[in-house]
Image (cartoon, rainbow, N blue to C red):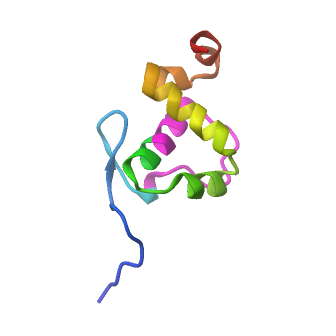
Amino acid sequence: MYIRKMTGPVFVPGLNGELISRADLPAPDTKRWVARRKAMVVAAVNGGLISAEEACERYALSMEELDSWRQAVAKHGTRALRVTAMQNFR
C-alpha cells in the first residue's frame, strides 16, 4: 500500500491550462530561467503545489524575486516574465 506523505494537491492547473505536478517542475539546479519555467513555478506556488518558501529554497531564489514574478503574471500575464519584456512592464 502506498502512503502519500505530502499534503496539498497532486496536480494544479498551469497558467496555460495544462495540469502540472511536482514531477513537471523545473530541476532544482536550474540556472537559465526562461519565461516558461518561471510561469510553471508561479503556477505551482499559486495553486498550492509547493509553498513560496519551498520554491525559494529549492531554486535558490529570493522571496522578492519570486514575488516579482508573481506580480508580473498577475498584472500582465506570462509574457511579462520574459527578460526583455520585464523592462517594458516595470
Residue 17: quadrant of the picture: top left
User: Would you place residue 14 above or below residue 8 in this image?
Assistant: above
Which image quadrant: the N terminus?
bottom left
Q: Residue 65 vs residue 45: left or right?
A: right
> Residue 53, how many percent across, how many down?
59, 56
Q: Residue 83 vs residue 79: left or right?
A: right
Residue at the location (32% across, 84% down)? 2
Which image quadrant: the C terminus?
top right
Asked whether residue 76 is drawn in magenta, I would say no
Residue at the location (55% across, 26% down)? 81
Task: Name the one closer to the observer, 31 or 73.
Answer: 73
Q: Residue 85 vs residue 75: left or right?
A: right
User: Would you place residue 67 above or below residue 80 in this image?
Assistant: below
> Residue 14, how many percent across, how many down?
36, 41
Residue at the location (69% across, 45% down)? 62
> Residue 56, how many percent across, how many down?
63, 51
Q: Residue furthest top?
A: 88
Asked whether residue 27 is drawn in magenta, I would say yes
Report the number of discs. Answer: 0
Residue at the location (53% across, 39% down)? 37
User: Would you place residue 35 above or below residue 83 in this image?
Assistant: below
The range drawn in magenta is: 24-42
Q: Residue furthest bottom?
A: 1
> Residue 89, how many percent across, how many down?
57, 13
